Amino acid sequence: MAQKIYKKSILSHKNNVRIYYEDTDAGGVVYHVNYLKYAERSRTEMLRKYKIEQEKLKINFNIQFIVKNLFIEYYASAKLDDLLNIKSLIIQISSAKIIMEQSIFNKKKLLAKINVTLGSVNLEGKPSRLPKFVLNILNTK
């Protein structure tokens, strides 16, 4: 199924995360997989900001988002008590996927950069078009 590519978007969102002891290893450094958790939370908060609630998409439209692919590059480590800033940017939207860039900072220092493609699938896991209201929201902001 060929996907129509909609305009490049410049929707953005910023989210803060405090590093707690549970996020770190024995040396007080953030465990690498936790950066993915912070990015996931930030993506969810971004969608919520634009009134796109994932549970409602699942119940009302029988779709959900999956991570189709993801690339992360680490530059530096976060440590206990740091306050991180996660910047999420939607860079492309098509009928069944959203491509995003996410950057994780401690103050102004870049710690990690993530490129992620979210796919829209039905409850059986097959690709499914995003509802028109979602496309309208993401393409008009």
Image (tube, helix red, strand yellow):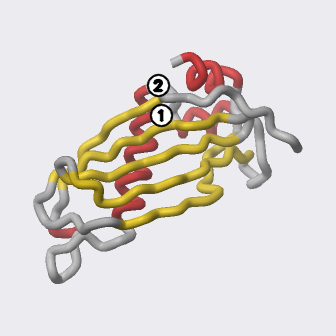
- Quadrant in which residue 32 is drawn: bottom left
Q: Quadrant of residue 77?
A: bottom left
Type of the residue with mark 2: Tyr
Instruction: Residue at 29%, 55% (x, y): give it.
Output: 110
Quarter location, residue 61: top right
Viewer-nearest residue: 61 or 118: 118
Question: Which residue is painted at 77% across and 41% down in the image?
Answer: 128
Q: Which residue in the protein does label 1 denote?
A: 47
Q: Position of residue 63 (x, y in %)?
A: 68, 41
73 or 31: nearer the viewer: 73
Is 55 placed above or below 111 here? above
Q: Which mark is residue 50?
A: 2
Q: Residue at x 59, y 44 (%)?
A: 99
Mark 1 in CB contact with mark 2 (< 8 angstroms): yes
Of the residues shown, which amino acid type is indicated by label 1? Leu
Residue 115 image offset from top left, x and y in percent: 52, 53
